[in-house]
Amino acid sequence: MPVYNFNAGPAVLPRPVLEQARAELLDYQGRGMSILEMSHRSPEYEAINASAEARFKSLLGLGDDYRVLFMQGGASTQFALLPMNFLPPGAVADYIVTGAWGEKAAEEARRVGQVHVAATTAGGGFRGVPQPAEIHLSERPAYVHLTSNETIQGVQWAALPDLGDAPLVADMSSDILSRPFDVARFALIYAGAQKNIGPAGVTAVLVRESFLAQARSDQPAILRYTTFARNNSLYNTPPVFAIYMLDLVLAWIAAQGGLEGMAERNRRKAALVYNAIDRSAGFYRGHAEPASRSLMNVTFRLPEEQLERQFVAEAQTAGMVGLAGHRSVGGIRASLYNALEEASCVALAAFMDEFLRRHG
Ligand SMILES: *Cc1c(COP(=O)(O)O)cnc(C)c1O
């Protein structure tokens, strides 16, 4: 029996996508073999690669001045590749740190070059995003990096900040394609697929051509964005099955009304869970400030750790999995990515009310 899957990543995938993948698994489009067994140079795979790129562009309204790349190594590899390609000696990269992933990104960039922390909300325990006046950019940053949604703390930018002319880079691993946003403001966006748009194994990168043109050319070929761009992400063997799944997920998102459809659905889902927190009279305490609450990862505490363990165990018995908070912050985390059905949030909210009645 399917469960209510609140896993933080890898995470729930759309049921119709899994069903299509199962139906096509042994015989892809009448070729008598699985897509898993085909060359990445085959016309079948090239069509998938092109389709995934085209669907990405169409969902985001990207023009020809952007490239869509499919890379490997997860967002964690992007933490290193970004400065290796775009932070030349003598330059400074600015980081706005609103949680654990932004901290890691900055830490990795420090191994490559000079980093300026333009703002951090670490002092407040990563409960919100900085006010515009709290962001102090360096003179001429090579780029400004932010994390649109901090998956571990459950802190999301409600609106992405206007930072002037500096090339803006975002780690959107946990909220990409969950809502409309102005892509044109970004020089580069990266996202591991395994939260909102597919299985683990592929990392989507959207990059503006003019920014790409500034990339260093002295890094090993496999570590350069330009290598992927020149070869349409087919320089070496790509994770073909992950990209095939990603393509199916993008088609599913389009069929749900695109980013507007996702945003509406995601707002409704998150409201169900946040409302359960807010009507609990302090029994459930949300981690994020209300203005920075994530629509993707709802993080909250209970009065005692013992109760939190009990909550997770009883929820599991009721068919809800993946609710334990990240080991670094504890408590509860409900991840409500694109593919999670509203019924899961209805079930969780009802369970929260009932748990409160018994233990409040
Ligand atoms: C999950 C996550 C990462 C790390 O992704 P990997 O694919 O495990 O490297 C980085 N940033 C954010 C925002 C994430 O949610």
Image (cartoon, rainbow, N blue to C red):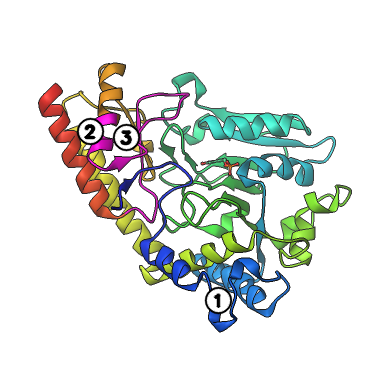
Whether 21 is drawn above or below 344: the answer is below
Q: Which residue is mark 1?
A: 28
Q: Are marks 2 and 1 in contact (CB under 8 Å)?
A: no
Helix, strand or loop under label 1: helix
Residue with the most extreme bottom position: 30
User: Who is closer to the viewer here, 68 or 156?
Assistant: 68
Q: Earlier in the sequence, mark 2 or mark 1?
A: 1
Helix, strand or loop under label 3: helix
Q: Which residue is mark 2?
A: 277
Q: Is mark 3 within 8 Å of ligand 1?
A: no
Magenta stretch: residue 350 in it?
no
Q: Mark 3: which amino acid?
A: Pro
Q: Earlier in the sequence, mark 1 or mark 3?
A: 1
User: Who is closer to the viewer here, 284 or 293?
Assistant: 284
Q: Mark 2: which amino acid?
A: Ile
Q: Residue at x 77, y 61 (%)?
A: 236
Magenta stretch: residue 336 in it?
yes
Residue with the most extreme left position: 357
Q: Which residues are magenta?
A: 313-340
Q: Earlier in the sequence, mark 3 or mark 2?
A: 2
Label 1 – label 3 distance at C-alpha: 47 Å
Q: Residue at x 26, y 54 (%)?
A: 342
